[in-house]
Amino acid sequence: NHVLRKYIVEIGGVYDFAAVVTSDNWISKRAIVTGAGKGIGRATALALARCGAEVVAVTRTRADLDSLLLECPSIKPVCVNLGDWGATEEALREAGGNVDLLVNNAAYATLQPFLEVTPDQFDISFNINVKAVLHVSQIVARGMKARGTGGSIVNISSQASQCALQDHTVYCATKGALDMLTKVMALELGPYQIRVNSVNPTVVMTKMGRLAWSDPGKAKTMTSRIPLGRFAEVEDVVNSILFLLSDKSSMTNGVTLPVDGGFLAC
């Protein structure tokens, strides 16, 4: 059983992911996941719910929330555009409750060569990828601080934060900013026992990822630079997120964790 597994892990000093996802410490936790309608966010929300956490799923697309609730009725839906500061404040306040875990997954991506970057695409990207993360984290962290119980925040960044990619001018810039935001949050919130880390994946095989990289020639240009020779699966990223949210990473703070098969190591 999970109690025995956890005992073996703690006494034997061997990490067992099964002990993380089945241990009782998830049962009393409340989590917010943004961008929860699709891909990594959706899989993370479902994984947390299966672990026993109370999950608030945030996305701007009602149809995605409806399908998510059909899959997992226990999830609490919040439909809001995180680019709207006032609406976000109101929506998260109405969601209520004490939040222990936050996954900032919502993001916006558009590809433009440097010389063709437009002001509107720049503003939209930074508004969602950086400003919204700051805002949602402020709301959640204030509650964590007031309760004095600490918490864990995971920001979903990218390998693009640390490596220049063709036509990714604005996206790379937003993810670089997000990594530094993560570090400053870790510095300032750490004294309140609020840990903040980021996960930095390579290309992930979500539905969108599979479509975008379906051409073998295009895929080869990226996988040839990854020592493991493949893209990440959604569960690869979710597993890293769950680890950083869990008590098993209680001394991990301010880290940008690559989930990239070694791409950034080369």
Image (cartoon, grey):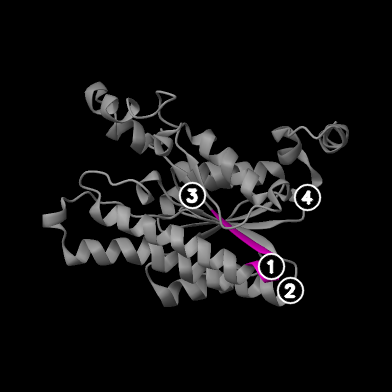
* Residue type, numbered disc 3: Asp
The magenta stretch is 190-197
Q: Secondary structure at mark 1?
A: loop
Q: Give the Cα distance between marks 4 and 1.
A: 15 Å
Give the residue type that dot 1 points to: Asn
Quadrant including the N terminus: top right
- The crowd level at tag 1 (other Cα within 10 Å; few <14, some 14-19, many 20+) is some
Is residue 252 within the magenta segment?
Answer: no
For disc 1, the marked residue is 98
Q: Which residue is mark 4?
A: 25
To which residue does mark 2 refer?
Answer: 147
Q: Which residue is mark 3?
A: 66
Q: Nearer the viewer, mark 3 or mark 2?
A: 2
Residue 123: x, y in percent? Answer: 26, 67
- Give neighbour class at mark 3: few <14, some 14-19, many 20+ (Cα, 10 Å): some
Q: Is residue 81 visible?
A: no
Residue 34 lies, with reference to residue 239, above or below; the image says below
Q: Where is residue 195 drawn, in percent x and y?
A: 63, 60
Q: Nearer the viewer, mark 3 or mark 4?
A: 4
* Front one among 81 and 171: 171
Separation of marks 3 and 1 at Cα, in angstroms: 24 Å
What secondary structure is found at the residue carrying circle 4? helix
Which badge, 3 or 4, comes first in the chain's sequence? 4
Q: Residue furthest front?
A: 266
Query: Where's the C terminus, which quadrant?
Result: top left
Q: Amino acid at mark 2?
A: Arg
Q: Nearer the viewer, mark 4 or mark 1?
A: 4
Q: Residues within 10 Å of mark 4 (few under 14, many from 20)?
A: some
Tell me the amino acid under the disc marked 4.
Answer: Asn
* Alpha-carbon span between mark 3 and mark 2: 32 Å
> Along the horizontal axis of the image, is 50 left or right of 163?
right
Q: How far apart, in angstroms, are the residues tagged by discs 4 and 2?
A: 18 Å
